[in-house]
Image (tube, rainbow, N blue to C red):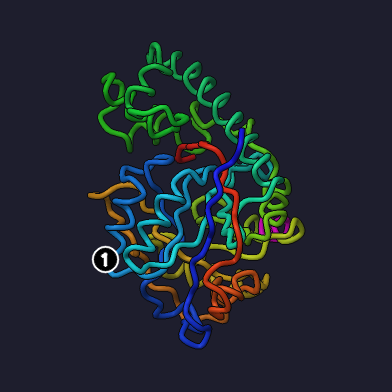
Amino acid sequence: MPMPDCPTDFALPASDALPASLEGVAGWDLHMHSRASDGALTPTDLVDLCHARGLTRIALTDHDTLDGVTEARERCAALGLQLIPAAELSCQWRGIGIHIVALLPQGVSAGLNAGLLQLAEARTARSREIAHRLEKIGLDDGLARARREAGSERPLGRPDFAAALVTAGLVPDRKTAFKRYLGAGKRGDVKTHWPALESVVGWIRDAGGVAVVAHPLRYGMTRRKRDLLFSAFIAAGGEAAELVSGYQNPELTRDLSRQLAFHGLYGSLGSDFHYPGGALAPGTLTPPPRSHVVPIWRHPALGPLIAGASAAIGQASIAPRLHHERS
């Protein structure tokens, strides 16, 4: 099917106007979700909330899709915000589910588009398997129940199954659903369908984008295992990681900054916002510590935008309607 064209004509201010370090940065949030995947707000409403909270530079990082980018971009243009086209892509490394944020200043290449199609198929198969597994603990007709909770035709995610478990009276709340059945290593944590880390990073590089390890402190890894992850990621062509994702332990964040500096990784940050009323809101972050980590906006792939060389960097083919869930 033909792909709709969407020019990624956002331009960041001149580089000397941008923060030279992550410490004390304000107005940035490069990890948020909309209703195009598992967020609660439409892209337009999310941008409105970001504007109300004083953010100026944002990335919409829905799971394995760029469906919301066109809408978000149009609203950002109306309000004077800069939007970086992006997505949070699912993969696995050594049997662990890993999320990679793809910052895509040049849009979507044919290789990345093929990867997004592969991820769409993987998510559909994964949802069926999750439903099958949850039937064994009493969630009958789980696929249909999760679909009702989603309220749309987007691919289902674990949050939809969590809501179905609550509605069915099998757990008191979504937090318990993840703790008992859907969290890492639990019955409903299905990751065998995800592509390898190396493949996903390759798709991002094919599109001229920057690959960023999302929330590296959330995978339950030892420091040594994170070092191994970062080494494999770099070998595949990855160049950045989120130093801060929402609220984090400050001491662990300082140690993570030392890891990123050691590996020469750029540092990114984001709230991982999903819905209003929760602990996190757009721009809500643990303050980044003083460090030698270079901010992601200093990456050469963003150079033309950061330098303000052009307000339009060409036509970026945004992927077909590939909505996706949280994780």
Q: Is residue 196 above or below residue 241?
A: above
* In this view, 248 is above or below 124: below
- Which amino acid does the dot numbered 1 rest on? Arg
| Direction right: furthest residue | 235
Q: Answer with the quarter of the image where residue 183 lies.
A: top left
Q: Is residue 248 above or below residue 18?
A: above
Q: Nearest the camera: 40 or 75?
A: 75
Magenta-colored stretch includes residue 231: yes
Residue lying furthest top in this view? 140
Which residue is pictured at 52% across the width and 43% down the height? 65
Magenta region's main secondary structure? helix
Where does the image place residue 124, in percent across and percent down from the top left?
55, 26
The answer to whether any part of residue 222 appears in the image is no
- For the point 60% across and 75% down, the residue is 304
> Is residue 308 among what the camera can see?
yes
Give the residue number, with chain letter if any, for mark 1: 53
Residue depicted at x 44% and y 70%: 251
Camera-nearest residue between 83 and 275:
83
- Segment colored magenta: 228-233
Q: Is residue 310 magenta?
A: no
